[in-house]
């Protein structure tokens, strides 16, 4: 790469050198001027998903009706799970698609606490996704057996409190659960290091991969991870509300029970036995009938990622985030912004957070006037996510220039301080 210059020619040269540049054509891009920096909340629509949805709705549902269950629907939680397994270093029989990330977390946490009978402490951090903390709180209240949650605090809200977590782990720790990439700052935990630390004291580990799957290389097998959950509508581009996945290490599957025991997770569901006998494998973590329409739409996005390779995606993501931070330093830092993400590339996921006392109004102006979609996390963080399959260097250049324009021309002053409920 030639020496960095904060101009459009430099960005265009980076795009010309980009081995993944052609993958952008696999996605629906209706408005080429729109700078979409929120692929870490909802990924773009793969063109293939339009065809797939026509096939599922008209071809399969329309023509095959209930016969569809025997023609691929019934097996789709495992089939799509097996594909996701390839993105996270798991075996095909260790991953299944079901429900939402939050619900799956509930199932796995209850299951893990029941397994770890004599241990009463759950450890997590204050950078975790709020829903994850709500689920933990709900689980211990529901179990009513004296569990407690230790929420280890990050001193500056950016880096995971790794040293303090290691110190907190002990013989009473039943479970350590963390988000692999932190949703606000983009901090990336060393999954192997913390998994080993937890195992040293006999604790189980559950990783939430929602913000890392599809953009960060993950090897659950070599790290010896016990449990994981993750989302499919972010970097996997599975579509709004697409079901999530569950990973459970094979040796644990026999002893772990799904607390939401339904017929789809039973061993011989069509025997219509009145007593529940769970499937011995990962399928026991299913509960009710899978959402076939949205489940089927996960596959096209995962196929694109497998074709591009996570390694290449990560390389581009690191390069793009480094480029974004360089532009930030040249063009935004002096305007009262603060960078709230790790400085070292190895500890970053694929988004950064920048804050400004006027963050909310700047965000409104970007969406309303500048055709930029970032996302906003209270109280004053603007998140900028890079999705290497479709984000161009040129887009990153323009995002920074448009943010600068909002500041220099004081465009944000036309917006109110009031916040609506969905951001
Ligand atoms: C996006 C995300 C979720 C989403 O959970 P849902 O149950 O799908 O609403 C959960 N955890 C993390 C860390 C996330 O980033």
Image (cartoon, rainbow, N blue to C red):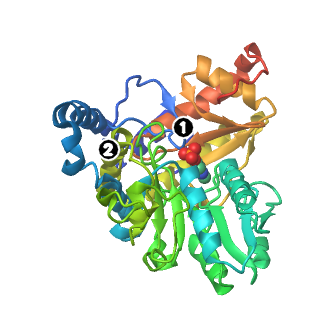
Left or right position of 410 against 85: right
Whether residue 197 can be seen here: yes
Whether residue 322 can be seen here: no
Mark 1 vs ligand 1: CB below 8 Å: no
Q: How crowded is mark 1: few (under 14 residues within 10 Å), some or many (20 or more)?
A: many
Of callouts 1 and 2, the N-terminal one: 1
141 or 90: nearer the eye? 141
414 or 4: nearer the eye? 414
| Mark carried by residue 342 | none
Residue 349, placed above or below residue 223? above
> Disc 1 marks which residue?
38
Left or right position of 272 against 260: left
What is the secondary structure assignment of the residue under circle 1?
loop
> Where's residue 418, x and y in %?
78, 21
Residue 280, placed above or below residue 344? below
> Where's residue 15, x and y in %?
39, 42
Q: Residues within 10 Å of mark 2 (few under 14, many from 20)?
A: many
What is the secondary structure assignment of the residue under circle 2?
helix
Nearer the viewer's eye, disc 1 or disc 2? 2
Residue in the image at 47% along x and 65% along y = 247
- How far separated are the C-alphas under marks 1 and 2? 23 Å
Quarter holding the C terminus is top right
């Amino acid at each position: 790469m030639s020496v960095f210059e904060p101009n459009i020619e430099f960005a265009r040269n980076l795009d010309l050198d980009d081995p993944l540049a052609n993958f952008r054509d696999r996605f629906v891009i209706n408005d080429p001027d729109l700078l979409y920096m929120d692929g870490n909340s909802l990924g773009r629509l793969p063109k293939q998903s339009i065809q797939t949805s026509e096939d599922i709705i008209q071809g399969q549902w329309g023509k095959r009706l209930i016969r569809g269950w025997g023609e691929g629907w019934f097996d789709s939680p495992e089939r799509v799970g097996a594909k996701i397994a390839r993105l996270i270093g798991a075996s095909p029989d260790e991953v299944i698609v079901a429900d939402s990330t939050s619900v799956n977390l509930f199932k796995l946490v209850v299951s893990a606490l029941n397994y770890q009978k004599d241990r009463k402490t759950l450890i997590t951090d204050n950078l975790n996704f709020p829903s994850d903390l709500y689920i933990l709180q709900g689980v211990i209240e529901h179990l009513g057996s004296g569990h407690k949650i230790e929420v280890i605090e990050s001193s500056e809200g950016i880096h995971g409190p790794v040293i303090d977590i290691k110190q907190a782990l002990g013989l009473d720790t039943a479970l350590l659960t963390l988000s692999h990439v932190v949703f606000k700052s983009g901090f990336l935990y060393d999954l192997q290091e913390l998994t080993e630390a937890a195992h040293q004291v006999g604790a189980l580990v559950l990783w939430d991969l929602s913000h890392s799957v599809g953009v960060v290389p993950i090897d659950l097998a070599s790290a010896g991870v016990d449990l994981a959950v993750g989302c499919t509508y972010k970097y996997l581009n599975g579509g709004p509300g697409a079901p999530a996945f569950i990973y459970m290490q094979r040796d644990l599957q026999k002893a772990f029970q799904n607390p939401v025991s339904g017929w789809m997770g039973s061993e011989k569901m069509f025997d219509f036995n009145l007593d529940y006998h769970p499937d011995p494998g990962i399928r026991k973590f299913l509960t009710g009938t899978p959402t076939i329409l949205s489940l089927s739409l996960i596959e096209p996005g995962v196929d694109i990622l497998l074709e591009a390779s996570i390694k290449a995606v990560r390389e581009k993501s690191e390069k793009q985030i480094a480029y974004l931070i360089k532009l930030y330093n040249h063009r935004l830092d002096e305007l009262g912004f603060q960078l709230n993400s790790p400085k070292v590339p190895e500890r970053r996921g694929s988004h950064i957070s920048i804050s400004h006392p006027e963050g909310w109004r700047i965000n409104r102006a970007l969406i309303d006037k500048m055709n930029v979609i970032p996302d906003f996390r209270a109280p004053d963080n603007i998140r900028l996510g890079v999705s290497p399959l479709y984000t161009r260097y040129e887009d990153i250049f323009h995002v920074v220039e448009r943010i600068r324009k909002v500041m220099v021309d004081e465009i944000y002053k036309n917006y109110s301080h009031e916040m609506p409920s969905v951001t």
